[in-house]
Each structure stands twice: as C-alpha cells, then as structure tokens.
Image: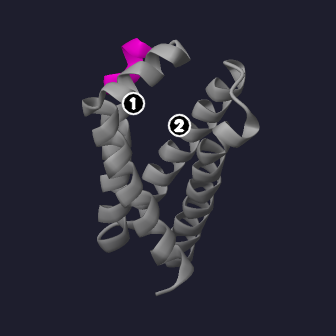
Amino acid sequence: MDLPTLVTFFSGISFLFFGTACLTTPYMEREFIRYGYDQQRALTGYLQILGGLGLLAGYWAFPPLAAAAAMGLSLMMMVGFGVRLKIRDSFWQSSPAFIYAAINLYLCLYYFGLISHQV
C-alpha cells in the first residue's frame, strides 16, 4: 500500500469517528463549550463525516471529490488549530489539529496532482 492510499484511509476513517463523536459524546459537547463554539458542534460533526466519506469515495471513484474533501478537512483543522491556540491550549494539546491539517493538505495536493495529470 502506497503512502497516499494509507493516509487517505487513515484520515477518512479518523474523520468518520471524529464526526460521530462530535455528534454523540458528552465529552465533545463539553469541549465545544470550552472552545466557545457550542452552536457549531453539530455542523462540525456532519462536515467531518462528509469529509471522511468524501475522501474514501473519492479514492475509489472520483479523485476531484477526494481533493475537495481533503481541502475542506485541511481548512477545518487549520481553524481548529487556531481555536485551540486562541483559548490558550498548549501547542502539544493543539498539535493533533495541526497534524490533521498537514495530512489533508498533502492529500489535497496529491489528488489535485492526479487530476492535472489526467487532463
């Protein structure tokens, strides 16, 4: 299995779990209150699920979908990283958002590269 495939599955499956947790767990409800974004929790959860599904479906069927999903997830995680720093979480506490932003930026560039080579 090559790196883009591995990272696509890792990120896609991760966001299916993160999105579901965001929608269903009391822990994530408390976290979004702590972030000051409790009204955006459901939207965030649904977008994470859609992003994860987009990565996985795009991998198999339509690379532009994977590119768009990766771009959206990368932007979401960049915002999440900024929010964590804004509320004074440490860099260590904020680092998962940064890592997922970087992973999805890599995937976005990879899938856009695939698209440009197919045209």
Label 1's element?
Answer: helix
Amino acid type of the residue tagged 1 in the rendering: Thr
Please identify the residue farthest to the bottom as the structure is shown.
Answer: 1
Is residue 65 something that shows in the picture?
Answer: no
Q: Which residue is mark 2?
A: 76
Q: Is residue 19 left or right of residue 83?
A: left
Q: Is residue 20 left or right of residue 6?
A: left
Q: Position of residue 49 (x, y in %)?
A: 31, 44
Is residue 46 something that shows in the picture?
Answer: yes
Q: Reply above or below: 77 against 42.
A: below
Residue numbers of the magenta segment: 37-43
Please identify the residue farthest to the front as the structure is shown.
Answer: 27
Which disc number belongs to residue 115?
none
Mark 2–mark 1 contact, CB under 8 Å?
A: yes
Q: Which residue is mark 1?
A: 44
Q: Quadrant of residue 41?
A: top left
Q: Residue, x 39% and y 29% (percent of image)?
A: 28
Label 2's element?
Answer: helix
Residue 76: within the magenta?
Answer: no
Q: Position of residue 12 (x, y in %)?
A: 39, 58
Q: Residue, x 63% and y 24% (percent of image)?
A: 83
Q: Reply above or below: 16 against 8.
A: above
